[in-house]
Amino acid sequence: MKDSTLLKTSLICSILGIIILYFLSANIEIEEMNISKINTIKLGADVKLTGEIKQIKQLEKLTIIDVKKDCVVPVLLFDNITLNVGDKIKVTGKLDEYKGKKEIIAETIIKT
């Protein structure tokens, strides 16, 4: 096989692969979870949940939000956004553990 044919074939396969990955990644969505099942999920997993803000603790560079649906789970937020107790929010983030308790490090928070 000629080098030019091999180069063209590999280039076409690479471009098609990138296009397929683009469309697949656009359709991937994290499934919303039940807060009460948070202990069955492994650390570092992407999680998505909806709940009501029960408490807000504002620290210097961190905001800790207690979100309740079936049970309460702390959500850590490093951005400054205006939230109030009683707001309903949708949180997407990573599951982590601190001092033996599960918490979510928020990537996005949307008021619903």
Image: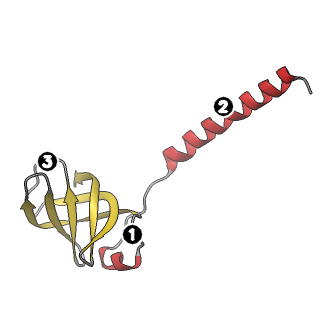
The answer to whether any part of residue 5 appears in the image is: yes
For marks 2 and 3 on the same chain, the one whose residue lies earlier in the sequence:
2
What residue did someone put label 1 on? 43
The image quadrant of residue 75 is: bottom left
Q: Position of residue 15 (x, y in %)?
A: 66, 31
Indicate which disc residue 81 carries.
Answer: 3
Q: Is residue 3 above or below residue 24?
A: above
Farthest residue toward the top? Answer: 4
> In which image quadrant can residue 87 be found?
bottom left
Q: Are marks 1 and 3 in contact (CB under 8 Å)?
A: no
Disc nearest the viewer among 2 and 1: 1
The amino acid marked with disc number 3 is Ile
How far is mark 2 from mark 1, CA to CA?
A: 35 Å
Residue 49: % across, % down:
31, 64
Packing grade of label 1 (10 A; few <14, some 14-19, many >=20) is some
**Lower position in the chain sequence, tag 1 or tag 3:** 1
Tell me where residue 29 sits by quadrant. bottom left
Q: Return the mark for residue 15.
A: 2
| Real-space CA distance between mark 2 and mark 3, rounded to the nearest whole angstrom | 40 Å
